[in-house]
Image (tube, grey):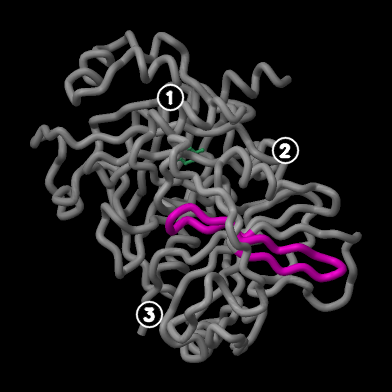
Amino acid sequence: MAASLSRPCFISLHLPYRQGWAQHLANTFRFQPVAVRETPRVRQLALRQESAIFLVNERLAPASTSSCDFLYDIDPQPTLGTASNVCFEVDDVPGLCRRLQSQGCSLLVPPTELSDDGGSVTYGVVSSVVGNISHTLLDRSSYRGPFLPGFQPIQGAPSATGDGIKITHFDHITYVCPRGGARAALDWYQRCFGFHRFLLNPQERPAEGYVLGEQGMGMLLLALQSAQETPAHGCKLVFAESLSQNGANQVDTFLEQHGGAGIQHVGLCTTDIVSTTRALQQQGVRFFTPPAAYYSQGGKAEEIRGVGQDPHMLAELGILLDTKVPGDKDQSGTDATESPSQEYLMQIFTHPIFSEETFFLELIDRRGAPGFGEGNIRALWKAVQVYMDQQQ
Ligand SMILES: O=C(O)C(=O)Cc1ccc(O)cc1
Protein backbone atom coordinates (compact mmCIF):
# COMPACT_ATOMS: atom_id res chain seq x y z
CA MET A 1 0.00 0.00 0.00
CA ALA A 2 1.32 3.46 -0.90
CA ALA A 3 1.75 6.08 1.80
CA SER A 4 -0.58 9.00 2.26
CA LEU A 5 1.30 12.26 2.60
CA SER A 6 -0.19 15.65 3.23
CA ARG A 7 0.98 19.18 2.44
CA PRO A 8 4.64 19.88 3.25
CA CYS A 9 5.38 20.78 6.84
CA PHE A 10 8.56 22.65 5.86
CA ILE A 11 11.05 23.10 3.03
CA SER A 12 14.66 23.09 4.09
CA LEU A 13 17.29 25.38 2.57
CA HIS A 14 21.03 24.86 3.06
CA LEU A 15 23.62 27.57 2.84
CA PRO A 16 27.36 26.95 2.70
CA TYR A 17 29.68 28.34 5.35
CA ARG A 18 29.56 32.15 5.65
CA GLN A 19 26.50 32.64 3.47
CA GLY A 20 23.64 33.97 5.55
CA TRP A 21 20.26 34.12 3.91
CA ALA A 22 17.81 33.66 6.75
CA GLN A 23 17.85 37.38 7.51
CA HIS A 24 16.87 38.11 3.92
CA LEU A 25 13.89 35.77 4.12
CA ALA A 26 12.84 37.44 7.35
CA ASN A 27 13.47 41.06 6.37
CA THR A 28 12.37 41.17 2.77
CA PHE A 29 9.86 38.35 2.41
CA ARG A 30 8.57 38.98 5.95
CA PHE A 31 8.76 35.36 6.99
CA GLN A 32 8.53 35.36 10.75
CA PRO A 33 11.32 33.60 12.68
CA VAL A 34 9.47 31.17 14.96
CA ALA A 35 12.12 28.83 16.35
CA VAL A 36 15.88 28.41 16.34
CA ARG A 37 18.44 25.72 17.12
CA GLU A 38 22.07 26.66 17.45
CA THR A 39 25.13 24.51 18.07
CA PRO A 40 28.79 25.59 17.86
CA ARG A 41 28.74 24.50 14.20
CA VAL A 42 25.27 25.21 12.79
CA ARG A 43 22.23 27.44 13.09
CA GLN A 44 18.80 26.21 12.03
CA LEU A 45 16.10 28.84 11.84
CA ALA A 46 12.43 28.13 11.14
CA LEU A 47 10.63 31.01 9.41
CA ARG A 48 6.94 30.99 8.82
CA GLN A 49 4.15 32.77 7.01
CA GLU A 50 0.78 31.13 7.69
CA SER A 51 1.36 27.46 6.78
CA ALA A 52 4.50 28.02 4.64
CA ILE A 53 7.60 27.21 6.72
CA PHE A 54 11.19 27.41 5.52
CA LEU A 55 13.90 25.83 7.64
CA VAL A 56 17.11 27.72 6.87
CA ASN A 57 20.25 25.77 7.73
CA GLU A 58 23.47 27.69 8.02
CA ARG A 59 26.98 26.62 8.90
CA LEU A 60 28.81 28.59 11.54
CA ALA A 61 32.07 26.69 10.97
CA PRO A 62 33.64 24.94 7.97
CA ALA A 63 32.07 21.57 7.13
CA SER A 64 33.22 18.68 9.28
CA THR A 65 33.24 15.06 8.30
CA SER A 66 31.64 14.01 11.57
CA SER A 67 28.00 13.00 11.91
CA CYS A 68 25.21 15.30 10.72
CA ASP A 69 24.77 18.48 12.72
CA PHE A 70 21.31 19.24 11.35
CA LEU A 71 18.21 18.02 13.14
CA TYR A 72 15.26 16.73 11.07
CA ASP A 73 17.46 16.70 7.97
CA ILE A 74 20.69 15.40 6.56
CA ASP A 75 23.74 17.41 5.62
CA PRO A 76 23.90 17.83 1.83
CA GLN A 77 27.36 19.42 2.30
CA PRO A 78 26.52 22.19 -0.13
CA THR A 79 29.14 24.27 -1.85
CA LEU A 80 26.31 26.57 -2.88
CA GLY A 81 22.82 27.42 -1.65
CA THR A 82 20.31 24.66 -2.26
CA ALA A 83 16.74 23.73 -1.31
CA SER A 84 17.26 20.07 -0.66
CA ASN A 85 14.68 18.70 1.76
CA VAL A 86 10.91 18.66 1.83
CA CYS A 87 9.32 17.47 5.07
CA PHE A 88 5.94 15.76 4.85
CA GLU A 89 3.71 14.91 7.76
CA VAL A 90 2.70 11.24 7.88
CA ASP A 91 0.81 9.06 10.37
CA ASP A 92 3.11 6.12 10.77
CA VAL A 93 6.80 6.97 10.35
CA PRO A 94 8.27 3.54 11.25
CA GLY A 95 5.73 1.73 9.02
CA LEU A 96 6.37 4.02 6.06
CA CYS A 97 10.16 3.83 6.47
CA ARG A 98 9.94 0.00 6.48
CA ARG A 99 7.78 -0.01 3.34
CA LEU A 100 10.06 2.45 1.55
CA GLN A 101 13.12 0.39 2.42
CA SER A 102 11.45 -2.76 1.11
CA GLN A 103 10.88 -0.84 -2.16
CA GLY A 104 14.60 -0.14 -2.39
CA CYS A 105 14.61 3.43 -1.05
CA SER A 106 17.58 4.45 1.03
CA LEU A 107 16.84 5.41 4.60
CA LEU A 108 19.22 8.20 5.64
CA VAL A 109 17.92 8.64 9.20
CA PRO A 110 16.01 5.73 10.77
CA PRO A 111 12.82 6.48 12.74
CA THR A 112 13.83 8.65 15.69
CA GLU A 113 11.77 10.00 18.57
CA LEU A 114 12.45 13.41 20.11
CA SER A 115 10.57 15.12 22.89
CA ASP A 116 10.45 18.24 25.05
CA ASP A 117 7.84 20.02 27.20
CA GLY A 118 5.50 20.30 24.20
CA GLY A 119 5.29 16.53 23.63
CA SER A 120 7.05 14.18 21.23
CA VAL A 121 7.56 13.69 17.50
CA THR A 122 8.88 10.83 15.40
CA TYR A 123 10.80 11.43 12.18
CA GLY A 124 12.93 9.64 9.62
CA VAL A 125 14.71 10.87 6.49
CA VAL A 126 14.69 9.12 3.11
CA SER A 127 16.57 9.90 -0.05
CA SER A 128 14.59 10.86 -3.17
CA VAL A 129 15.53 9.55 -6.60
CA VAL A 130 15.91 13.15 -7.79
CA GLY A 131 19.34 14.81 -7.37
CA ASN A 132 20.25 15.93 -3.85
CA ILE A 133 16.66 15.89 -2.59
CA SER A 134 15.68 14.12 0.62
CA HIS A 135 12.39 13.88 2.48
CA THR A 136 11.87 14.12 6.19
CA LEU A 137 8.82 12.09 7.21
CA LEU A 138 7.36 13.50 10.38
CA ASP A 139 4.63 12.56 12.81
CA ARG A 140 3.93 15.57 15.02
CA SER A 141 0.41 14.55 16.05
CA SER A 142 1.52 14.29 19.72
CA TYR A 143 3.32 17.64 19.75
CA ARG A 144 1.90 21.00 20.86
CA GLY A 145 4.99 23.25 20.79
CA PRO A 146 5.46 26.08 18.25
CA PHE A 147 7.82 24.13 15.96
CA LEU A 148 9.68 20.95 16.86
CA PRO A 149 11.58 19.49 19.86
CA GLY A 150 15.19 20.65 19.93
CA PHE A 151 14.28 24.19 18.82
CA GLN A 152 13.89 27.26 21.03
CA PRO A 153 10.76 29.32 20.32
CA ILE A 154 11.37 32.93 19.25
CA GLN A 155 8.90 35.28 20.89
CA GLY A 156 7.57 38.55 19.62
CA ALA A 157 9.06 38.64 16.13
CA PRO A 158 7.35 41.16 13.84
CA SER A 159 4.55 39.74 11.73
CA ALA A 160 3.88 40.32 8.04
CA THR A 161 0.39 41.63 8.65
CA GLY A 162 -0.05 45.16 7.44
CA ASP A 163 2.88 45.07 5.00
CA GLY A 164 0.72 43.99 2.08
CA ILE A 165 2.53 40.61 1.92
CA LYS A 166 -0.03 37.82 2.00
CA ILE A 167 1.49 34.37 1.54
CA THR A 168 -0.60 31.45 2.76
CA HIS A 169 1.05 28.14 1.81
CA PHE A 170 3.31 26.23 -0.54
CA ASP A 171 1.40 25.80 -3.80
CA HIS A 172 3.89 23.67 -5.70
CA ILE A 173 7.50 22.57 -5.74
CA THR A 174 9.19 22.32 -9.12
CA TYR A 175 12.05 19.87 -9.60
CA VAL A 176 14.53 20.02 -12.44
CA CYS A 177 15.27 16.48 -13.59
CA PRO A 178 18.08 15.32 -15.85
CA ARG A 179 17.19 14.70 -19.50
CA GLY A 180 15.17 11.50 -19.71
CA GLY A 181 14.61 11.51 -15.92
CA ALA A 182 11.24 13.21 -15.33
CA ARG A 183 9.08 10.15 -16.00
CA ALA A 184 11.11 7.94 -13.65
CA ALA A 185 10.85 10.60 -10.94
CA LEU A 186 7.08 10.83 -11.41
CA ASP A 187 6.74 7.04 -11.21
CA TRP A 188 8.85 6.90 -8.05
CA TYR A 189 6.74 9.49 -6.23
CA GLN A 190 3.54 7.76 -7.32
CA ARG A 191 4.75 4.34 -6.25
CA CYS A 192 6.48 5.26 -2.99
CA PHE A 193 4.47 8.19 -1.67
CA GLY A 194 1.07 7.53 -3.23
CA PHE A 195 0.89 10.85 -5.08
CA HIS A 196 -1.73 11.09 -7.84
CA ARG A 197 -1.18 12.32 -11.36
CA PHE A 198 -2.17 15.92 -11.99
CA LEU A 199 -2.61 17.06 -15.58
CA LEU A 200 -1.08 20.51 -15.95
CA ASN A 201 -3.09 21.60 -18.92
CA PRO A 202 -5.99 20.38 -21.07
CA GLN A 203 -3.57 19.78 -23.93
CA GLU A 204 -1.54 17.30 -21.88
CA ARG A 205 -1.66 13.66 -22.92
CA PRO A 206 -1.07 11.52 -19.82
CA ALA A 207 1.36 9.15 -21.55
CA GLU A 208 3.51 11.96 -22.91
CA GLY A 209 3.26 14.72 -20.33
CA TYR A 210 2.96 18.39 -21.11
CA VAL A 211 5.43 19.20 -23.88
CA LEU A 212 6.16 22.85 -24.58
CA GLY A 213 8.01 22.53 -27.81
CA GLU A 214 7.68 25.52 -30.10
CA GLN A 215 8.84 29.12 -30.20
CA GLY A 216 12.36 28.42 -29.00
CA MET A 217 11.18 26.39 -26.00
CA GLY A 218 11.85 22.78 -25.25
CA MET A 219 10.53 21.49 -21.96
CA LEU A 220 8.62 18.50 -20.67
CA LEU A 221 6.48 18.98 -17.57
CA LEU A 222 4.78 16.28 -15.48
CA ALA A 223 2.96 16.85 -12.21
CA LEU A 224 1.56 15.10 -9.17
CA GLN A 225 -0.55 16.05 -6.21
CA SER A 226 -0.79 14.30 -2.90
CA ALA A 227 -3.67 11.88 -2.47
CA GLN A 228 -5.19 13.83 0.41
CA GLU A 229 -5.54 17.18 -1.31
CA THR A 230 -8.04 18.66 -3.75
CA PRO A 231 -6.49 20.10 -6.93
CA ALA A 232 -7.19 23.65 -5.77
CA HIS A 233 -5.66 23.34 -2.30
CA GLY A 234 -2.84 20.83 -2.38
CA CYS A 235 0.87 21.24 -2.86
CA LYS A 236 1.77 19.82 -6.25
CA LEU A 237 5.09 18.44 -7.36
CA VAL A 238 6.13 19.51 -10.87
CA PHE A 239 8.91 17.67 -12.72
CA ALA A 240 10.63 19.66 -15.47
CA GLU A 241 13.03 18.26 -18.03
CA SER A 242 14.79 20.13 -20.81
CA LEU A 243 14.12 19.02 -24.38
CA SER A 244 15.80 22.08 -25.79
CA GLN A 245 18.39 21.93 -28.54
CA ASN A 246 18.75 25.72 -28.64
CA GLY A 247 21.66 26.33 -26.28
CA ALA A 248 21.47 27.70 -22.73
CA ASN A 249 18.07 27.70 -21.08
CA GLN A 250 16.76 27.90 -17.52
CA VAL A 251 16.47 24.13 -17.01
CA ASP A 252 19.89 23.13 -18.36
CA THR A 253 21.46 26.13 -16.62
CA PHE A 254 20.00 24.91 -13.32
CA LEU A 255 21.53 21.44 -13.82
CA GLU A 256 24.89 22.93 -14.66
CA GLN A 257 25.08 25.53 -11.89
CA HIS A 258 23.43 23.39 -9.20
CA GLY A 259 25.68 20.45 -10.01
CA GLY A 260 22.75 18.15 -10.84
CA ALA A 261 19.02 17.76 -10.41
CA GLY A 262 17.12 19.37 -7.55
CA ILE A 263 14.47 21.86 -6.51
CA GLN A 264 14.34 24.73 -9.01
CA HIS A 265 11.55 26.78 -7.48
CA VAL A 266 8.81 26.89 -4.90
CA GLY A 267 5.44 28.41 -5.73
CA LEU A 268 4.15 30.47 -2.80
CA CYS A 269 0.40 30.87 -2.82
CA THR A 270 -0.78 34.41 -2.24
CA THR A 271 -4.30 35.73 -1.85
CA ASP A 272 -3.28 39.13 -3.22
CA ILE A 273 -0.47 39.03 -5.77
CA VAL A 274 -0.68 42.75 -6.52
CA SER A 275 -0.14 43.96 -2.96
CA THR A 276 2.38 41.19 -2.23
CA THR A 277 4.47 41.92 -5.34
CA ARG A 278 4.38 45.65 -4.69
CA ALA A 279 5.47 45.20 -1.08
CA LEU A 280 8.27 42.81 -2.05
CA GLN A 281 9.50 45.14 -4.81
CA GLN A 282 9.63 47.92 -2.23
CA GLN A 283 11.77 45.62 -0.08
CA GLY A 284 14.17 45.22 -3.00
CA VAL A 285 13.11 41.78 -4.27
CA ARG A 286 13.79 41.51 -8.00
CA PHE A 287 11.39 39.71 -10.35
CA PHE A 288 11.50 38.49 -13.92
CA THR A 289 9.19 40.71 -15.91
CA PRO A 290 7.88 40.03 -19.39
CA PRO A 291 8.50 42.48 -22.23
CA ALA A 292 5.95 45.34 -22.30
CA ALA A 293 4.53 43.84 -25.52
CA TYR A 294 3.17 40.90 -23.47
CA TYR A 295 0.39 43.15 -22.16
CA SER A 296 -0.60 44.62 -25.53
CA GLN A 297 -0.34 41.77 -28.01
CA GLY A 298 -2.90 39.13 -29.01
CA GLY A 299 -5.84 40.42 -26.98
CA LYS A 300 -3.96 40.13 -23.65
CA ALA A 301 -5.32 43.44 -22.32
CA GLU A 302 -8.88 42.31 -23.09
CA GLU A 303 -8.21 38.92 -21.46
CA ILE A 304 -6.98 40.73 -18.33
CA ARG A 305 -9.85 43.21 -18.26
CA GLY A 306 -12.31 40.37 -18.91
CA VAL A 307 -11.57 38.87 -15.48
CA GLY A 308 -11.73 42.23 -13.75
CA GLN A 309 -7.98 42.92 -13.46
CA ASP A 310 -6.17 46.05 -14.58
CA PRO A 311 -3.65 45.52 -17.41
CA HIS A 312 -1.72 48.69 -16.51
CA MET A 313 -1.31 47.62 -12.91
CA LEU A 314 -0.15 44.11 -13.89
CA ALA A 315 2.22 45.60 -16.49
CA GLU A 316 3.68 48.02 -13.95
CA LEU A 317 4.48 45.14 -11.59
CA GLY A 318 5.30 42.50 -14.24
CA ILE A 319 2.59 40.04 -13.17
CA LEU A 320 1.53 37.36 -15.68
CA LEU A 321 -2.12 36.40 -16.07
CA ASP A 322 -3.52 33.36 -17.82
CA THR A 323 -7.17 32.42 -18.26
CA LYS A 324 -6.44 29.31 -20.34
CA VAL A 325 -6.00 26.90 -17.46
CA PRO A 326 -8.06 23.82 -16.64
CA GLY A 327 -10.56 23.78 -13.79
CA ASP A 328 -11.16 20.87 -11.37
CA LYS A 329 -13.67 19.29 -13.71
CA ASP A 330 -11.08 19.16 -16.47
CA GLN A 331 -9.03 16.60 -14.52
CA SER A 332 -11.76 14.14 -15.53
CA GLY A 333 -10.98 14.69 -19.19
CA THR A 334 -13.27 17.52 -20.36
CA ASP A 335 -11.53 20.06 -22.56
CA ALA A 336 -11.42 23.39 -20.68
CA THR A 337 -11.41 25.29 -23.95
CA GLU A 338 -14.94 23.96 -24.61
CA SER A 339 -16.27 25.44 -21.39
CA PRO A 340 -15.07 29.03 -21.04
CA SER A 341 -14.97 30.13 -17.41
CA GLN A 342 -13.72 32.98 -15.28
CA GLU A 343 -11.07 30.80 -13.67
CA TYR A 344 -7.61 32.26 -14.06
CA LEU A 345 -4.27 32.51 -12.35
CA MET A 346 -1.59 35.13 -11.90
CA GLN A 347 2.10 34.44 -11.41
CA ILE A 348 5.41 36.23 -11.00
CA PHE A 349 8.89 34.76 -10.52
CA THR A 350 11.79 36.18 -8.52
CA HIS A 351 15.34 36.28 -9.80
CA PRO A 352 17.46 33.42 -8.46
CA ILE A 353 17.90 33.98 -4.75
CA PHE A 354 21.36 32.49 -4.22
CA SER A 355 24.46 33.64 -6.08
CA GLU A 356 24.06 31.02 -8.82
CA GLU A 357 21.27 30.84 -11.39
CA THR A 358 19.50 28.07 -9.54
CA PHE A 359 16.73 28.31 -6.94
CA PHE A 360 14.02 30.98 -7.12
CA LEU A 361 10.60 31.71 -5.65
CA GLU A 362 7.30 32.27 -7.37
CA LEU A 363 4.15 34.04 -6.24
CA ILE A 364 0.98 32.44 -7.51
CA ASP A 365 -2.54 33.79 -7.04
CA ARG A 366 -5.11 31.20 -8.06
CA ARG A 367 -8.55 32.50 -8.84
CA GLY A 368 -10.23 29.11 -9.03
CA ALA A 369 -7.69 27.70 -11.49
CA PRO A 370 -5.69 24.73 -10.16
CA GLY A 371 -3.59 24.15 -13.30
CA PHE A 372 -0.69 25.98 -14.95
CA GLY A 373 -0.97 28.43 -17.83
CA GLU A 374 0.95 27.72 -20.99
CA GLY A 375 1.07 31.46 -21.78
CA ASN A 376 2.65 32.21 -18.40
CA ILE A 377 5.23 29.42 -18.69
CA ARG A 378 6.22 30.68 -22.14
CA ALA A 379 6.41 34.28 -20.91
CA LEU A 380 8.62 33.20 -18.00
CA TRP A 381 10.84 31.17 -20.33
CA LYS A 382 11.34 34.20 -22.59
CA ALA A 383 11.95 36.60 -19.70
CA VAL A 384 14.61 34.28 -18.24
CA GLN A 385 16.16 33.83 -21.67
CA VAL A 386 16.52 37.61 -22.09
CA TYR A 387 18.03 37.85 -18.59
CA MET A 388 20.52 35.02 -19.26
CA ASP A 389 21.54 36.55 -22.57
CA GLN A 390 22.17 39.87 -20.77
CA GLN A 391 24.30 38.11 -18.12
CA GLN A 392 26.65 36.64 -20.76
O1 LIG B 1 4.76 27.62 -13.99
C1 LIG B 1 5.27 27.04 -13.02
O2 LIG B 1 5.25 27.50 -11.88
C2 LIG B 1 5.93 25.73 -13.21
O3 LIG B 1 6.30 25.12 -12.24
C3 LIG B 1 6.26 25.30 -14.62
C4 LIG B 1 7.68 25.61 -14.93
C5 LIG B 1 8.67 24.66 -14.74
C6 LIG B 1 10.00 24.93 -15.02
C7 LIG B 1 10.35 26.16 -15.52
O4 LIG B 1 11.65 26.42 -15.80
C8 LIG B 1 9.37 27.13 -15.71
C9 LIG B 1 8.03 26.85 -15.42
The type of residue carrying mark 1 is Ala
The type of residue carrying mark 3 is Ala
Between 196 and 182, the residue placed more toward the observer is 196
C-alpha distance separating marks 2 and 1: 22 Å
> Pointer 1 and pointer 3: residues touching (CB < 8 Å)?
no
Which residue in the structure is indicated by mark 2? Answer: 356
Q: Is residue 37 magenta?
A: yes
Reply above or below: 193 against 16: below
What SS does tag 2 mark?
loop
* Residue 57 appears in view: yes
What main secondary structure does the magenta stretch of the protein show?
strand
Reply above or below: 6 against 207: below
Which residue in the structure is indicated by mark 3? Answer: 2
Which residue in the structure is indicated by mark 1? Answer: 379
Looking at the image, tell me whether mark 1 or mark 3 is earlier in sequence order. Answer: 3
Residue 250 place in picture, x, y as percent: 58, 34
Can you tell which mark lies on residue 221?
none
Which is in the foreground here, disc 2 or disc 3?
Answer: 2
- Judge from the rendering whether residue 95 lies leftward or rightward of residue 12; answer left or right: left
Residue 228 place in picture, x, y as percent: 30, 69
Q: Is residue 351 magenta?
A: no
What SS does tag 1 mark?
helix
- Judge from the rendering whether residue 276 lies leftward or rightward of residue 353; answer left or right: left
Query: What's the residue at 55%, 25% (across, down)?
Result: 282
Which part of the image, by quadrant, shows the N terminus?
Answer: bottom left
The type of residue carrying mark 2 is Glu
C-alpha distance separating marks 1 and 3: 37 Å
- Judge from the rendering whether residue 188 lies leftward or rightward of residue 199; answer left or right: right
